[in-house]
Amino acid sequence: MKSWWPSSRRQRAANDAQLHAEAAAAGTERALRRLEWTVIRRLDGLLQGDYRTLMRGAGLDLADLREYQHHDDVRHIDWNVTARLQVPHVRVFTEDREMAAWFVLDLSRSVDFGSGTRAKREISAGFVGVVARLLTRHGNRVGALVYGSKLEAVIPPRTGRAHVLHLMHAMDRRAEPRGAKPGGTTRLAELLDAAGNMIRRRSTVFVVSDFLSEPGWERPLGRLTQRHEVLAVRLSDPLEQEIPDLGLVPLTDAETGEQLWVDTHDPGFRKRFARLATERESTLRQALGSAGVDTLELSTDDDLVEAIVRFVDLRKRRVRSGVAYAKVMG
């Protein structure tokens, strides 16, 4: 006699998968709607059109000539005019209002960390959702490269709210379940190299990461800035800078799974930890500054609206004053 149980089980499994997908999609929709009501509505009243500061175009239509300033791109120098006037001049172009923006997303296991109510992954998703929605509402296209333990997804740039939902859902799918085995250390250089190879047309690139990675990512980041306008969005948590007196606690490396018991009651340990954190901060700032990228620091205890407004304001001031590197403290 033929048994129909295997087919029934397959059907139940398919139904369960469909229900799970529908629930995940509904959760992403609720998350975006919450961002639209709590964050984007506030930004609409604060930015007043300054969203374009987040993504400055570089069009092909010549608009003007002016004297060279030290923050200008040397590729825009008009050598004929410079030779004739004996003063360096640069071409000024009409900005392309429909440039693409790319989110280069580090979603490795270290971004799952958060000492308070939110993890770094949550503030990453909030930032991407808000900025992507701000840009697509004005006709700009957004795409993404999603990295976990390797490059796992490439989302081509498109516009529209449905596309933003697709992007956020891809980030949510990347979240690993509790108890999953560690996937190894982050290789941010691999992600940045992939971005340099895949993003051909000049774009605005948001590199969203906590920059806890194997060394060697600085040169790929520098190469990326030669073709694109790159903005680093650095995710952090207060506990990564200073450990309070909690007694004997286990510290676990989220990426390798290595666990170490430490006595946080020891003032010497806390002092050494703070010193190493300060040194790491200094090295990271120097690397980002050398690459010539603007940096927005987002901490898990930050207000997203205030952070984005401060960042936009400093970018405008940098463009006006010619400061090569602007940094926003959380």
Image (spheres, rainbow, N blue to C red):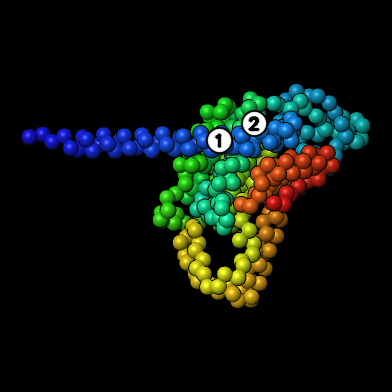
In this rendered view, identify the residue nearer to me: 124 or 200: 124
Amino acid tagged 1? Leu
| Above or below 244: residue 330 | above
Residue positioned 51% across, 34% down in the render: 29
Determine whether the residue tagged by mark 2 lies in a helix, strand or loop. Answer: helix
Task: Give the vertical position of 140 relative to 186 (above or below).
Answer: above
* Picture quadrant of residue 38: top right
In the displayed structure, 244 sits above or below 152; it is: below
Q: Nearer the viewer, residue 197 or 166?
A: 166
Left or right, 86 with reference to 258: right
Binning the other alpha carbons within 10 Å of mark 1 as few (below 14), some (14 to 19) or many (20 upward) gives many
Q: Position of residue 58 (x, y in %)?
A: 72, 30
Q: Position of residue 9 (x, y in %)?
A: 23, 38
- Identify the residue position indicated by label 1 in the image: 32
Q: Which kind of residue does numbered mark 2 sit on?
A: Leu
**Residue at 69 percent of width and 45 percent of height:** 307
The residue that label 2 is drawn on is 135
Measured Cα–Cα span from mark 1 to mark 2: 14 Å
